[in-house]
Image: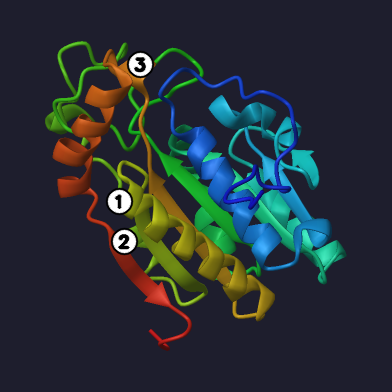
Amino acid sequence: MTMVYEKSKGLTDVPFHYCPGCTHGVIHKLVAESLVELGVLDDTIGVAPVGCSVLAYKYFNCDMQEAAHGRAPAVATGIKRVFPDKVVFSYQGDGDLASIGAGEIVHVAHRAEKITTIFVNNAIYGMTGGQMAPTTLVGQKTTTSPLGRDEALSGKPIRISEMLATIDGAKFVERVSVDTPANIRKAKKAIKRAFECQIKGEGFAIVEVLSTCPTNWGLTPVKALDWLKDNMIPYYPLGNFRNFEEGK
């Protein structure tokens, strides 16, 4: 019998705890497959954040370190400097990275730390009950913005990729989505290239992944994917913003 597909060896056999329809599982798969295909799984150390992916250390089949809320880039920096030959990545949500950890991610990029960050943007705080995040869209209803995000009070959502792309030390910056099979394939390519950026010693790399949160959005998994396509992608356009291979 010919094997056409099997679970990535980069993942453990522990069942995911994520809500039905959540795309964290898809993103985990893409990260794991990339590490295996690059031949670096056994030399990789990941940093799990506070947020929905707080238990990521159970799922990735590599060494993992837990970090305090927002501090994953700082922890990853310390690990990389102690073990410069290891591949080090942080896996963070938008509340973790764009809010409490905004300072950490900016300074990691400024220092051109040779780490890779997977930034999952679902426009809401997921684990803590669906509060407004820095990435929540104008008009989007959350538990702390029941009438919708008010631009006059909260400003516009932060476009993290565009901001970090202005920093010289950020050598690879790309925004992708996992709402369709075609976009999932593109997302894997970007994640793999972000790890290659680190392996080649170029500097900091980040991939922002637009994701869904059916539970806190109050939508079915299918309708959540539609909402992402119709609302998030127009504000958070997909594409590459910095590419070490092209000298941008």
- Image quadrant where residue 130 sits: top left
Q: Nearer the viewer, residue 152 or 222?
A: 222
Task: Residue 5: give x, y in percent of width and height.
Answer: 58, 48
* Residue at the disc numbered 3: 216
- Colour setting: rainbow
Q: Is residue 104 visible?
A: no
Circle 1 packing at 10 Å, graded few (<14), some (14-19), many (20+), is some
Give the position of the C terminus as an image quadrant.
bottom left
Secondary structure, mark 2, is helix
Tell me the kind of residue under disc 1: Arg
Secondary structure, mark 3, is helix
Q: Spatial distance from mark 3 to mark 1, Cα to Cα? A: 21 Å
* Residue at the disc numbered 2: 162
Q: Spatial distance from mark 1 to mark 2, Cα to Cα? A: 6 Å
Secondary structure, mark 1, is loop
Task: Residue 62: give x, y in percent of width and height.
Answer: 79, 47
Q: Earlier in the sequence, mark 3 or mark 2?
A: 2
